[in-house]
Amino acid sequence: MIKRITAVMAAVALATVGFAAPSKAATEADCGKGTVLCIGLVTDTGKVDDKSFNQSAWTGAQNGAKAVGGFAKYIETTDPKDYANNIKQFTDKKYDIIIGVGFLMAEAITTAAQAYPNVKFIGVDQFQGTAVSNLAGLVFPEDKAGFLAGYLAGHLTKTGKTGAVLGTDTVPPVRYFGEGYRNGVAYAAKELKKKYPATRLIYHAPDNAFNDPAWGAATAQQLLSQGFDVIFGAGGNTGNGALLRIAKKKGVFCIGVDSDQWNTLPEARPCLVTSAMKLIDKGVENIIKSAKAGTFKGGNVFGDVGLAPYHGLRSKVPASVQKKVRAITPKVLNGTVKTGVTL
């Protein structure tokens, strides 16, 4: 199910751009000359430094550019109507690889890939139902990362109340994270022979779902006031707003998403026990390398997921729980333990 993206806006003034030059000091002027691999990234709505989804993809683009001696540049999207126009800025300048970040950009990326068969495209979180030879969809089993986060939460909660503050459930990866988390909590409760209240998943409305930290904070506060003591935040800046609010309350845990947010959102460290990671940066970097090596293939490319280290909160996680998480992780990742999520 791909959300319909509306017509292209004529103006591009709202787009913010930034770039990372490689060691050979290549510039955008080198694009299209066949001497430098030019890589353009269009963010989902929100900033490139969102400490989460967009930032992970941009890190991968920069690392990929460095690895192949290329040039990387980003454009920040402020409105979904700008997706196609932002992509066009890169095709007009003859970029070799164009990365579109997020499920909502899938139609715009697919349309561009069909129109520009000599350009390689990477669609992050864009499952390819029908393969296009020059479009690689980088997708992840979010349900597995969410399940592991929930399993940990189920073993850490003292009140039995676990929740999640999430982006919109119209985006499948967000729903997979949430449902996986809920089922992981239930699995832990069954192990412990305890009966917890159902994990509460609160999704943002579709509009501005990933860039509403105020809503995230207010929603987290609502859960905290009701005695929830382990809360998962998954939704770009919206989820970050939740994590930052939870960090102000003692005696509760929060769980980050996409990247290891201990590193990207240090203000959340007082509560941040782990993050449900999608290794977006590594996935993007590897596909860029494949383009340089001539092994790029269209269709779906499956990236890795897992839990981030406990870092400074390791002492708060009982050794017995750490052992249980270590034991179940490979079973979840290889499918021996099912997440119960319908994909």
Image (cartoon, rainbow, N blue to C red):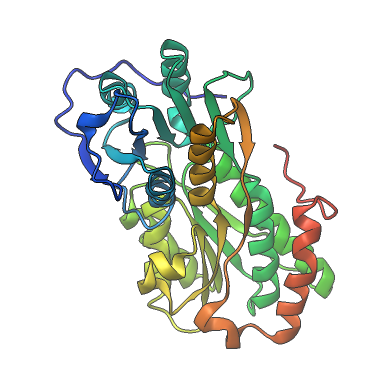
Give the image quarter of residue 74: top left
Q: Which residue is drawn at 23% across and 33% down?
A: 28
Considering depth in this image, is 115 or 169 the residue closer to the camera? 115
Residue 49 picture location, percent across and down:
31, 53
Considering depth in this image, is 191 or 312 the residue closer to the camera? 312
- Residue 4 at least partly seen: no
Left or right, 100 with reference to 17: right
Q: Residue at x 41, y 30 (%)?
A: 97
Vertical arrangement, residue 83 with respect to residue 141, above or below: above
Question: How many dots with numbers?
Answer: 0
Considering depth in this image, is 8 or 131 the residue closer to the camera? 131
Quarter of the rendering occupied by the C terminus: top right
Considering depth in this image, is 89 or 155 the residue closer to the camera? 89
Left or right, 132 with reference to 193: left
- Residue 200 at least partly seen: yes
Vertical arrangement, residue 188 with respect to residue 97, above or below: below
Residue 208 picture location, percent across and down:
35, 41
Give the image quarter of residue 37: top left
Quarter of the rendering occupied by the N terminus: top right
Q: Residue at x 79, y 65 (%)?
A: 328
Residue 332 picture location, percent across and down:
77, 56
Residue 32 picture location, percent across and down:
30, 23
Seen from this angle, which residue lies furthest bottom?
A: 315
